[in-house]
Image (tube, helix red, strand yellow):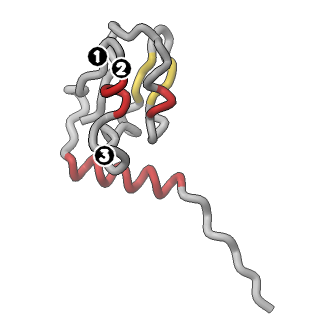
């Protein structure tokens, strides 16, 4: 599952910089999580960093975005591959 930030969010700015997938962003009123980028930190950490650091515990699982651990790992692999720098071109004579 992806995570979800609820309206209890106090916009403390703790979660957004901790997201290794850049899935957290400032919405119209509170921070939000892009589910297609959220891996619950699978592949990066043992537990979701945003939920672990949230001072008001307002980041539960998103029941509308159900994914298995294997699916989260595949998403992690896809996202990290997309971020990987392109291999340099080697020119030989």
**Where is 35 relative to 60, above or below?**
below
Label number found at residue 54: 2
Helix, strand, or loop for circle 3? loop
Helix, strand, or loop for circle 2? loop
Distance from disc 3 to disc 2, alpha carbons, whole Å, reads 18 Å
* Among numbered discs 3 and 2, the one appearing first in the sequence: 3
**Where is 54 relative to 49, above or below?**
above
Q: Residue at x 23, y 27 (%)?
A: 61
Left or right: where 93 falls relative to 74: right
Residue beneath label 1, please?
57
* Among numbered discs 1 and 3, the one appearing first in the sequence: 3
Image quadrant occupied by the C terminus: bottom right
Where residue 2 appears, x then y in whole percent?
29, 33
Residue 47 quadrant: top left
Where residue 56 appears, x then y in whole percent?
32, 12
Q: Residue at x 42, y 21 (%)?
A: 32
Label number found at residue 42: 3
Helix, strand, or loop for circle 1? loop
Q: Camera-side residue: 31 or 18?
A: 18
Where residue 24 appears, x then y in whole percent?
45, 28
Q: Residues within 10 Å of mark 3 (few under 14, many from 20)?
A: many
Q: Residues within 10 Å of mark 1 (few under 14, many from 20)?
A: some
Q: Residue at x 67, y 71 (%)?
A: 88
Image quadrant occupied by the N terminus: top left
Residue 63 quadrant: top left
Distance from disc 1 to disc 2, alpha carbons, whole Å, reads 5 Å
| Cβ atoms at labels 1 and 2 below 8 Å apart | yes
| Cβ atoms at labels 3 and 2 below 8 Å apart | no
């Amino acid at each position: 599952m992806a995570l979800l930030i609820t309206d209890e969010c106090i916009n403390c700015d703790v979660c957004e910089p901790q997201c290794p997938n850049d899935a957290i962003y400032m919405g119209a009123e509170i921070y939000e999580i892009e589910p297609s980028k959220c891996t619950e930190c699978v592949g990066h950490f043992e537990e979701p960093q945003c939920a672990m650091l949230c001072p008001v515990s307002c980041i539960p699982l998103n029941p509308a975005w159900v994914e298995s651990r294997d699916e989260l790992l595949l998403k992690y692999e896809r996202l990290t591959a997309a971020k990987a720098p392109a291999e340099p071109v080697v020119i030989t004579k």
